[in-house]
Amino acid sequence: MSNILIINGHQYYPFSEGKLNATLVDTASTLFQNKGHQTRIVTMEDEINIDQQLAHHQWADFILFQSPINWMGVSWSFKKYMDEVYTAGMAGALCHGDGRSAQNPTKNYGKGGALLGKKYMISVTFNAPKQAFDDKNEFFDGKSVDDLLFPMHMNFKFFNMTALPTFACFDVMKNADVESDLARFSAHIDQYF
């Protein structure tokens, strides 16, 4: 069985309390535990101890990153978490610098990752409707969810992790269908575990 780290990147806002993100985290944790996996959950409300977070990443075989998308990216508290934890991890816990050497400074950028064999999945919630993506006539100009999440994927590639397909809930503020989202989420998880 696997060790699974679940990170809830939700940041509380008066108009967005984080109930869906918390429900997705709880659903994932229950699904994983029912299959015999060990889970640890980190939330942005937790007191973040950098060494402990690095140890969580090293312990995990799989990391689920759950986050709302705010202003086309993850919450500021999740970004702060990444800035602090992942920068500290460059000393060897997550990667060995950026992979380059002084002898050959133009080669192997991004090849220093220390998390080979570990997998991750990004799961996000959007106010945007699904129809806003993958259509050149809509807001995202034909771009996909993963196009928007490209910087996040590059962060984890930097650590030499392998992506599982992204999951997304759409239109969660104006036209939510939580029951359907949870069913899709459970089926998505079940495909890989």
Image (spheres, helix red, strand yellow):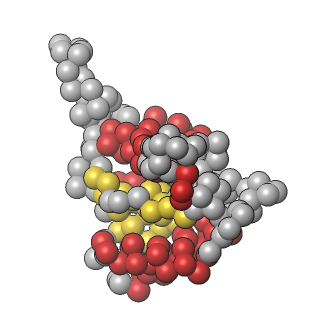
Judge whether 127 appears above or below 159 on screen: below
Q: Is residue 67 visible?
A: no
Marks counted in the figure total 0
Residue drawn 47% across the image and 73% down it: 185
- 170 on left or right of 61: right
- Percent across and percent down for residue 51 are 47, 47
Q: Residue furthest right?
A: 14
Q: Is residue 189 visible?
A: yes
> Which of these two is toward me, 139 or 3?
139
Judge whether 48 appears above or below 21 on screen: above
Judge whether 136 appears above or below 58 on screen: above
> Which of these two is toward me, 140 or 92?
140
Q: In what quadrant of the picture does the N terminus appear? A: bottom left
- 156 on left or right of 12: left
- Percent across and percent down for residue 58 are 35, 54
- Percent across and percent down for residue 169 are 55, 64
Q: In what quadrant of the picture does the C terminus appear? A: bottom left
Residue drawn 50% across the image and 61% down it: 168
Judge whether 77 appears above or below 39 on screen: above
- 170 on left or right of 34: right
Residue drawn 35% across the image and 78% down it: 190
Residue drawn 55% across the image and 78% down it: 180
Q: Residue furthest front?
A: 137
Q: Residue furthest bottom?
A: 34
- Percent across and percent down for residue 102 are 23, 14
- 69 on left or right of 53: right
